[in-house]
Amino acid sequence: MPKLATFPKAELEALVDGSMRLSDYLEFASGLDVDGVELYPLIVDLEGPETWSRYQQACGDMGLEIPMLCCSPDFTHPDPAFRQQEIEKEKRWIEMAHGLGAGFCRVLSGQRRPEIARQEGIDLAADSIRACLPFAEEHGVTLILENHYKDGFWEYPEFAQPMDIFCDLVEAVGDHPRFGVNYDPSNTLLAGEDPLELLSRVKHRVVTMHASDRYLKHGTLEDLSREEGVTGYAERLAHGEIGRGMNDYDAIFSTLNSAGFDGWISIEDGVDGPEQLERSVAFLRRKMTEHFP
């Protein structure tokens, strides 16, 4: 049976600027029907390595694990020095994941810069990810490549957001015991593509999953695609209660089960309040019981 975690989507800004303490968030999360919490490396309370084991212990005392660290390296910059800095960042985040007891650390391709051609971007990202893999293996951490939309601090969307580029990047990195896919069905919707088609193509590489539901407050997916060059998430985009948006979780979980998936499912929800998050947790628990007996 997969395990269920939650990510502080609604609380992230406060955790990064320090107006909310991580201990307070963990206390809140411990009241949810989840097995763990996915964390973000820029949370201010995680700045010092001496804090990592302390928070791992605090989670353990609350009956929680820390399975994943949600990182956003930018590997598609044309400057080799910039990419090397991003590789070093990812290595530090791997160390942080290890220190927190997390088995998974996210990687991305990078930003979809207009001057970077398709194959060049794939090559730059694949080379950078491969450069991190020996370090990840030394620390017992698996790098998970997400079909992402856009980091909140980026100007351009994810280079590998389109399905064909993402799948080609997965193949370019190649098979490695410390490399897998973090599948996010909502991000496929934002690319104007079918989440189930992507899942069918990468299902045997999926080791973790982000669970969310999305809807557009106004406009269309075509309108969203025209908003490149705007820092952060588009205003028209909203996270919705899981089970009430555009994703078919029966089909998703059935496919994952058929592929033997037994990893972590991490919830990105709660932006409209804790009651919404509680309903999303209950929905996912019910569907997990149905599809992973």
Image: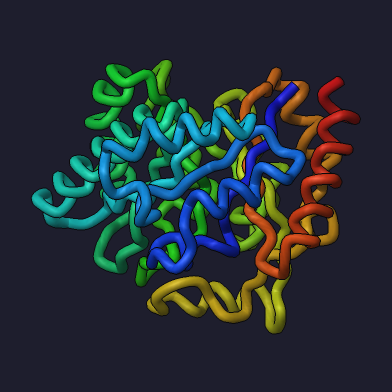
Location of the N terminus by quadrant is top right
In the picture, measured across the screen, residue 64 lies left or right of residue 111, that is: right
Q: Can residue 201 be seen at all in this image of the molecule?
A: no
Relative placement, left or right, of 245 versus 212 is right
Between 183 and 13, the one lying in front of the other is 13
Residue at (55% x, 48% y) in the render: 163
Q: Quadrant of the C terminus?
A: top right
Residue found 27% across the figure and 38% down from its top: 49
**Apparent side of residue 246 relative to residue 221 in the rendered image (left or right):** right
Relative image position of residue 104 (x, y in whole percent): 46, 31
Residue 186 in percent (x, y) is at 66, 55
Residue 8 in percent (x, y) is at 57, 55
Q: Position of residue 264 (x, y in %)?
A: 62, 31
- Marker count (numbered): 0
Depth order, front residue of 271/52: 52
- In the displayed image of the protein, which residue is found farthest to the left? 81
* Residue at figure coordinates x 55%, y 54% from the top left: 24
Residue nearest the viewer, comparing 171 with 270: 270
- Above or below for 81 versus 199: below
When the figure is inspected, residue 292 is found, relative to residue 234, above or below; the finding is: above
217 w.r.t. 109: above or below = below
Task: Using the rendered image of the protein, determine whether residue 273 is visible from the camera's viewpoint.
Answer: yes
